[in-house]
Image (cartoon, rainbow, N blue to C red):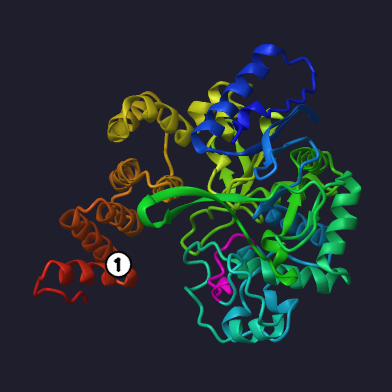
Amino acid sequence: MKSYFLLILCIFSSYGYGQETASAIEAIIKREMAERKIPGLQIAVVKEGKVIVKRSFGVANVQDQVPVTDTTVFAINSCTKVFTGTAIMQLAEQGKVDLSAPVSRYLDDLPEQWQKVTIEQMMTHISGFPEILKLFDPATGDTSKTEKEIWDELKGLPMEFKTGEQFSYNQTNYYLLGKIINKLSGKSFDQFFKEEQFQKVGMPHTLFGDSRDVIPHFAPTYRYRNMTEGENGNRQKLVNDYFIFPPYSRTGAGLNSTAEDLAMWIIALQSGKLLKTEESLQRMWKPIKMNNGSQTMWSPGWGLTKFRTKHKAIGMSGGGRSAFLVYPDDHLAIIVLTNLAGSYPEEFLEELAGVYYPEIIKSDPLTYLRLHLKKIGFDKAIELVNSEKKKNPDFKPQEAELNNWGYRMMSENNIKNASEIFKLNVYLFPNSWNAYDSYGEALLKLGNKSQAAIMYRKSIDLNPDNEYGKKVLNEIFTANGSTNSSVK
């Protein structure tokens, strides 16, 4: 097969940024594509309300070596949720929905425990609703059940936790938001999106669809899977990634788009074409409060939230293949779309932003750690964080970000480095049961059962309701032939 990088199509827009900046962007993209084995990628950069970079790399279709162009359409998966959040805000501006109101004001036929959950609690994933993906799996393509059958079954499932007590990324929230948009707009949500967002912005390549649909200029999605094939043993193989999103669920993950379309949407959002007031935009970009008074990880509809003193950033990622960040105070936005599930472009967005504002890299602890630990070794993580905190008190890696990073590395079979990040998380957040649970999982994968058991025991001590941790700990005891195999 020809090298992906022999098929690079570069499209430049020039608004006063020279060859040095373009070369820096290209170097980062080429490095990340090579390390992550990404077949094809689009990038767009917005600066001061203009698209200043629009570039395409690699191949959209591996089978036929079709190059990526600026009109190649990529699946954006959960990035769809920012459009859903914006649609809800548009209805709020029309006086049709109140973000602080309970969902029962707008939808009937809800279980009693669901009725007091507010719209913004749904938008920030602290509802506690049961997960609709337990009833259908986009990866299997099973569409044998009707929406009514799934809805009736979903209502019979128990709440996962008390509303407002914790965060849990949950597609039921956005399924219900879609039902609200349908009811209050008097249109199907896909038509509402088309009229109130796509047509207003001018987004000719943005549309709903999944692997079943014929989408012009579409880049199929790929992923690497571990394959066991006789004498070949275990190896990673690039395979087609098939996914189905039933139409009623597409407010959570059903859109496809181009980097340029998303760039134009961001410009329109910030310039008042989509929302009438700055207050609406800021509310959508502001976290709400949990029951204990702490801030949510999400703002309404937006999942990549970096509310720091300088270089605040907010955006979204989808499917481990598409991501973008908006820097409101810097008048900057970075959009990267790929056709590889598990490429996680959100990991290098801040480095790309650092080409324009170098201080952004240090303002984001995850980006700073990723770049430096690759050089000095992940076993130096605690040492590096302590050193940086002495120089900069605002250098504060976040528990959830470190946890997510560790799991991304584990998904790539980079378990040793992942264990060092989980170890750092335990060091920084010694009262977090989840940090110990994650570290225990990594240690178990490394074969260190005794240390894994210590971590799971600590996790259970901090959270007696950690039933999964109890199950794993019992399995460790049983495998070791211990008589103390019961964990209460």
Q: Which residues are magenta?
A: 123-134
The residue at which mark 1 appears reads as 469
- Residue plotted at (67% across, 62% down): 252
Looking at the image, residue 400 sits to the left or right of residue 323; the answer is left
Number of marks present in the image shown: 1
The answer to whether 94 is drawn above or below residue 388 in the figure is below
Residue 25 found in image quarter: top right
- Residue plotted at (74% across, 52% down): 256
Looking at the image, residue 274 sits to the left or right of residue 130; the answer is right
- Residue plotted at (56% across, 69% down): 127
Please provide percent x and percent y for residue 66: 73, 39
Quadrant containing the N terminus is top right
Q: Is residue 277 visible?
A: yes
The answer to whether 384 is drawn above or below residue 337 in the figure is above
Q: Nearer the viewer, residue 331 or 143?
A: 143
Please provide percent x and percent y for residue 175: 68, 70
Q: Main secondary structure of the magenta part?
A: loop
Q: Is residue 126 magenta?
A: yes
Q: Secondary structure at mark 1?
A: helix
Q: Is residue 386 magenta?
A: no
Residue 133 found in image quarter: bottom right
Q: Residue furthest front?
A: 231
Please provide percent x and percent y for residue 173: 63, 68
Q: Is residue 94 visible?
A: no
- Residue plotted at (44% across, 28% down): 371
Q: Nearer the viewer, residue 445 or 198?
A: 445
For badge 1, the amino acid type reads Gly
The answer to whether 201 is drawn above or below residue 250 in the figure is above
Q: Residues within 10 Å of mark 1 (few under 14, many from 20)?
A: many
Quadrant containing the C terminus is bottom left
Please provide percent x and percent y for residue 409: 41, 45
